[in-house]
Image (cartoon, rainbow, N blue to C red):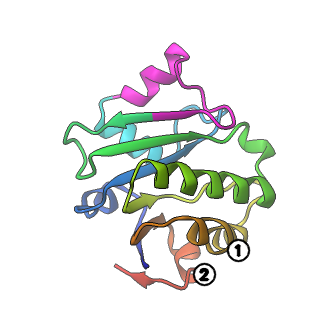
Amino acid sequence: MSVTVYEIGLEGLDALAGVDALCLFVAEDDRPLPGTAGYVDWRLCGALSRVLKQGFFTGVKDDWLLVPSDGRIPIPRIFAVGLGARKNLDAASLGVALANAARVLDKAKVDSIAMELPGGEKVDEAAQAQALQQHFLPAFKGKRVTILADKGLAKLLPVRKS
């Protein structure tokens, strides 16, 4: 499996040509949307924020949403995954969320995925890297994983940087 890293931001999103899907982890208390989710929402002209405001998808644990990108980013499908409250996110719940995401993405026949690993007060960069390696990568059957990360996390990931 190929694993690469791009920096979080619009340039990182624009570099993701050839990726099947983007997985966004959204907590129910993330308002406004942070990180990659915020950049994607910007590119989608607030579509994610509207869905959140309408209550169709709220970010509660195990909440899922599939949104087409309509060509606004180079990835056709966007999967939003509810994390529950970010203040409750810890290493164990992150591992469960990543393993569940891998299973759902496999059912959707995703061969290449891009995502930002969620963090929080109880989840530092080392826990993020460990959760990726122990929970997501073993469960994901696709061929390519791209992580959108800041430089601190990127240093902890044993991947090829792009």
Residue 80 located within the stretch drawn in magenta: no
Question: From where the camera sits, is residue 35 visible?
Answer: no
Q: Is residue 56 above or below residue 79?
A: above
Q: Residue furthest top?
A: 54
Q: Going by the image, does 8 lie left or right of 117?
A: left
Q: Residue at x 37, y 62 (%)?
A: 111
Q: Nearer the viewer, residue 131 or 39?
A: 131
Residue 84 point in image, percent of width and height: 71, 37
Instruction: Read off the residue under disc 2.
Output: 156
Amino acid type for the residue under numbered disc 1: Ala
> Label for residue 126?
1
Mark 2 vs mark 1: which is more N-terminal? 1
* Res. 145 in view: yes
> Marks 1 and 2: in contact by CB < 8 Å?
yes
Residue at x 23% of width, y 52% of height:
74
Q: Is residue 62 rendered magenta in the image? A: yes
- Residue 50 or residue 146, whichever sits in front: 146
Q: Residue at x 36, y 28 (%)?
A: 46
Q: Residue 133: image x %, image y %?
A: 63, 75
Q: Locate residue 87 relative to residue 58 in the image: left or right.
A: right
Closer to the camera, 21 or 14? Answer: 21
Q: Position of residue 45 (x, y in %)?
A: 30, 30
Specify start and end residues of the magenta stretch as a single range.
46-65
Q: How far apart, in angstroms, are the residues tagged by discs 2 and 1?
A: 7 Å
Q: Is residue 162 above or below residue 112?
A: below
Element carrying mark 1: helix
**Mark 1 Cα-neighbour bin, 10 Å: few <14, some 14–19, many ≥20:** some
Name the kind of residue labelled 2 in the image. Leu
Assign the C terminus to one quadrant of the image: bottom left
Circle count: 2
Residue 68 lies, in percent from the top left, at 30, 36
